[in-house]
Each structure stands twice: as C-alpha cells, then as structure tokens.
Amino acid sequence: MKWSIHHKSITASTNIDALAGNHGDVFTADFQTEGKGRLDHVWHSSDGKNLIMSVVLNVEEISPQRISTFPLVAGLAVAQGCEKLLNISFGRCLKWPNDVLINERKLSGILCRLNGNLLIVGIGVNVNETVFPDDIVATSIKNLSQSANDIQLKHIRDIILQELGRLYDKWTSHGLAGILKDIKNRDYLKGRVLLLRQTDDDASPVSGLCEGISNDGAIIINGRTFYAGEANILKCPLA
Ligand code: BTN
C-alpha cells in the first residue's frame, strides 16, 4: 500500500481534512481545535504529543455490513503496531467496537466515517502524553515504554500504517476471516457483564454477559448479536 501523507501543524479535525482525500491519503496534525470522538465526544490531545491521523480507504466493492467491522481492523492495526514498537504483547486490548485499552486505560480511539465510496478512518493514539485530566482514564505508549525518551510520532505512524495496509488488503479480499483469530485473542469484553447502549435512539439498553465477538464482527450479549453501540462494563465475574 502506498500512502500519501498530508501534515498540518494545526487543523480543526483531520477527519474533516480527510473529506477532501482519495484512497491512500493520510491526514495528520500536531493539534486539532475540534478533535472528534465517538458519540459527539471531544478528542483531547496536547499539541505535538500524540498521533492524530485520518486515513482514506476505498470501500467501493465492500458491503455495508463488512464496512461496519473496520474499526476492529483499525484497532488491531494500532495494537499490533504498538506491540511491535514496544516489543511486548498487549493481550486482551481490543474493546469492541473501536478502542484499544491497556490496563483498563485507553491508549487509542478510532472513529470511522463513510464519505461516498471512501472510508475515513480517524485514529488517535496517546503517544508521549504522560499525564491525563482526572476524568480521562487513559495511558500512552510512553507510559508503557521502558524508556524516558519521547517516541517519534512519524515512527509510530509508519508502523501503524504498515499494519493497516496489510490488514486492509486481507479484509478487502476475505473480510474478517483471515484476522478473526487475532481479533478474538485480543477481545477485552468477553466474559464481562456489560451495559450496551444501542446507537439507534429508539432501542433500549441491553445488559448481560458478553460472549465475545462474532465471526462477522458483532458483539454477542446473552446470545444476541449487536452490530453497533457503546459498551460499558458493569462487572467482571471471571476476573
Ligand atoms: C473515540 O475514541 O471516541 C474516537 C476518537 C478518534 C480520534 C481521532 S484523532 C484523528 C481523527 N480526527 C478526529 O477529529 N478524530 C479522530
């Protein structure tokens, strides 16, 4: 995969910049004035400290159901990239549908948006930020690293893009099939009791035991599958 990098020191949101992009374009910034998270949350990131990027991918031939699984693929790319950089294994770090958590703290968040035939994959990774506001339960690569030195953002960007390109190729050809084992091995929610708020406003929240991620990327709670929503842990009976 050949990536074209477009960098700004300051922007509103790289996900907005990416609306003007084509397949293979990557929009990065040192700082966002309107960084966007899921469910209208704000994505905070101090100037120049962290990886902020939005990747544009062609999804013309892909079904909507398969497209909805891409946050998991992007999460896997982030997890594998960071694991390579740090030379450690994160274990169960993928919180369906779009977070990478280490030691219960958020390392990365992913926000995908469809723009016609193009998927904008917004990825925020906490890299050199070491102290977070009290209301943000987060960690960073630097917090997880043995070294006191800052990590070069371009270095982690390129490692993650390499993983993302490789996984995107597999996913376009075979869907989740070729990478399901890697996703399931990292499933953070399996075995925990959850409250799932469904993104459809009319649907009521669902609680129950999470049985893991299904072969088509949904979450299974009490035998029912859900393709979208926000999961919060109520308790962890298997811990
Ligand atoms: C979340 O966890 O809620 C998703 C966070 C996504 C943040 C990234 S940073 C790069 C891109 N630009 C944005 O405004 N948001 C995404």
Image (tube, rainbow, N blue to C red):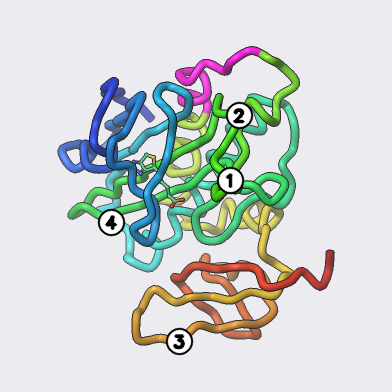
Front disc: 4 or 2: 2
Label 2, residues with CA under 10 Å away: few <14, some 14-19, many ≥20: some
Considering only vertical position in the picture, is 165 above or below 41?
above
Label 1, residues with CA under 10 Å away: few <14, some 14-19, many ≥20: few
Which residue does the numbered mark 3 point to in the structure image? 204
Q: Is residue 35 magenta?
A: no
Residue at 63% in and 48% down:
101
Quadrant holding the C terminus: bottom right
Which residue does the numbered mark 2 point to in the structure image? 130
Label 3, residues with CA under 10 Å away: few <14, some 14-19, many ≥20: few
Which residue does the numbered mark 1 point to in the structure image? 134
**Element at label 2:** loop
Q: Is mark 3 within 8 Å of ligand 1?
A: no
Instruction: Answer with left or right where residue 220 lies relative to residue 209.
Output: left
Q: CA distance from mark 3 to mark 4?
A: 33 Å
Percent coordinates x, y for residue 107 in the rendering: 58, 41
* Main secondary-structure element of the magenta-colored stretch: helix
Which stretch appears magenta? 149-159
**Element at label 1:** loop
Mark sitting earlier along the chain (3/4)? 4
Which residue does the numbered mark 4 point to in the structure image? 61
Front disc: 2 or 3: 2
For ligand 1, give the image quadrant: top left
Residue closest to the eye, 159 or 201: 201
Cβ atoms under marks 2 and 1 closer than 8 Å: no
Front disc: 2 or 1: 1
Q: CA distance from mark 3 to mark 1?
A: 30 Å
Considering only vertical position in the picture, is 111 above or below 3?
below
